[in-house]
């Protein structure tokens, strides 16, 4: 291995390669988080196209943009030919077909299968080393170990092992939290059958998924509107003008997180002595209890005038008494 590379040189090989065929096994330990493999997006909104692993290990094949993921028992979870992705949600059901550009690989160990792009190294979110890279050997391959500094809002650095030849990440760790994604078996440079990366059977098309997601969003929105009518008795609140409410999260215990158009966020929970961490999303906070419920309103631009806040509290208290926990 050559002399220790400058950080810019290491970023170059992580972004540009070269690409070599790789196969092996990846272990991921995310604590209590569910090992979700992929999440697709359409026009910025999450789509129900994803694959979940059945354990902490996945068997993988990759060659540039071409990918294949299986569970250790041989159940196929994902195939990509570099242009299209097929995700297999349930055994016996056709896979969901998605454009490769709409699929992100970010958790469950799958980020080790794809090369980091140049934009990944902009900003301050684990983009700068705390010191020079160190020579190491990983699964018999020459590699570089580097620690990445966290941004100000995160508490601990990330540790990364980079393959010296290909620039692929062989291990990502956060030692402070015991999180690790790593190759545990690895063969590089072996010829791989192109059939590993294709699917020619029945599929659920991308257009069908978009229509399914549209129906689900409309159904969810109708449920939330009914909930507002039944529990708050209104779909708008008088602040300085009539402002529509949009409910984003609703729990079985009546907790809600909503936005008030042009004003800010609205959070309600059953009365508790716990801190209000879930309501701290910026702005000027106004918090109170009315007996059964705790409320928090965060005004984005400015503090609410006393008269507007009093009117808002009166409306919420009057409309919600019948839904007290």
Image (spheres, helix red, strand yellow):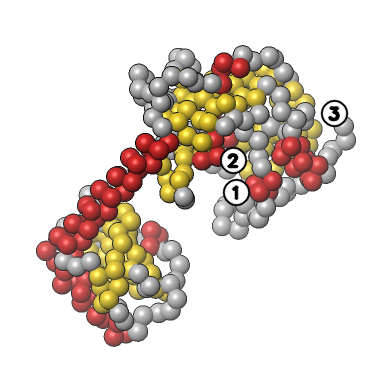
Residue carrying label 3: 1
**Do callouts 1 and 2 mark residues in contact (Cβ within 8 Å)?**
yes
Residue carrying label 2: 174
Disc 3 residue crowd, few under 14, some 14–19, many 20+, Cα 10 Å:
few
Residue carrying label 1: 156
Q: Is mark 1 on a helix, strand or loop?
A: loop
Quick one: 198 or 315, which is closer to the camera?
Answer: 198
C-alpha separation, residue under disc 1 versus residue under disc 2: 7 Å
The residue under the point 27% across, 76% down is 242
**Is the residue 172 above or below the residue 45 in the image?**
above
**Do callouts 3 and 2 mark residues in contact (Cβ within 8 Å)?**
no
Residue 127 in percent (x, y) is at 68, 49
Q: Can residue 35 be seen in this view?
A: no
Residue 84 in percent (x, y) is at 53, 31
C-alpha separation, residue under disc 3 versus residue under disc 2: 26 Å
**Horizontal side of residue 16 vs 237, given as left or right:** right
Quadrant location of residue 254? bottom left
**Is the residue 275 above or below the residue 157 in the image?**
below
């Amino acid at each position: 291995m050559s002399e220790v590379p400058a950080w810019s040189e290491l970023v170059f090989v992580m972004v540009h390669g070269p690409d070599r065929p790789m196969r092996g096994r990846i272990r991921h330990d995310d604590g209590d988080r569910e090992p979700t493999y992929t999440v697709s997006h359409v026009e910025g909104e999450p789509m129900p196209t994803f694959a979940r692993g059945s354990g902490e290990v996945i068997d993988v094949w990759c060659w540039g943009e071409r990918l294949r993921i299986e569970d250790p028992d041989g159940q196929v979870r994902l195939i990509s030919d570099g242009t299209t992705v097929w995700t297999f949600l349930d055994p016996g059901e056709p896979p969901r077909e998605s454009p490769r550009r709409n699929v992100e690989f970010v958790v469950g160990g799958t980020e080790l299968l794809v090369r980091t792009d140049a934009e990944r190294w902009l900003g301050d979110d684990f983009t700068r080393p705390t010191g020079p890279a160190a020579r190491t050997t990983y699964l018999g391959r020459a590699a570089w170990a580097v620690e990445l500094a966290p941004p100000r809002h995160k508490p601990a650095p990330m540790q990364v092992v980079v393959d010296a030849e290909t620039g692929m990440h062989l291990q990502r760790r956060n030692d402070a939290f015991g999180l690790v994604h790593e190759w545990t078996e690895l063969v590089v440079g072996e010829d791989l059958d192109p059939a590993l990366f294709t699917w020619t059977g029945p599929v659920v098309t991308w257009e069908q998924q978009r229509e399914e997601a549209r129906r689900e969003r409309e159904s969810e929105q109708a449920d939330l509107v009914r909930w507002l009518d039944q529990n708050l008795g209104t779909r708008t609140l008088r602040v300085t003008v009539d402002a529509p409410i949009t409910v984003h999260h609703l729990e079985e215990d009546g907790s809600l997180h909503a936005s008030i158009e042009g004003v800010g966020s609205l959070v309600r929970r059953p009365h508790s002595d716990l801190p209000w961490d879930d309501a701290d999303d910026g702005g000027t906070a106004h918090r109170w209890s009315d007996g059964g419920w705790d409320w928090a309103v965060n005004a984005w631009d400015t503090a609410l005038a006393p008269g507007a806040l009093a009117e808002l509290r009166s409306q919420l208290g009057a409309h919600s008494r019948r839904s007290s926990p």
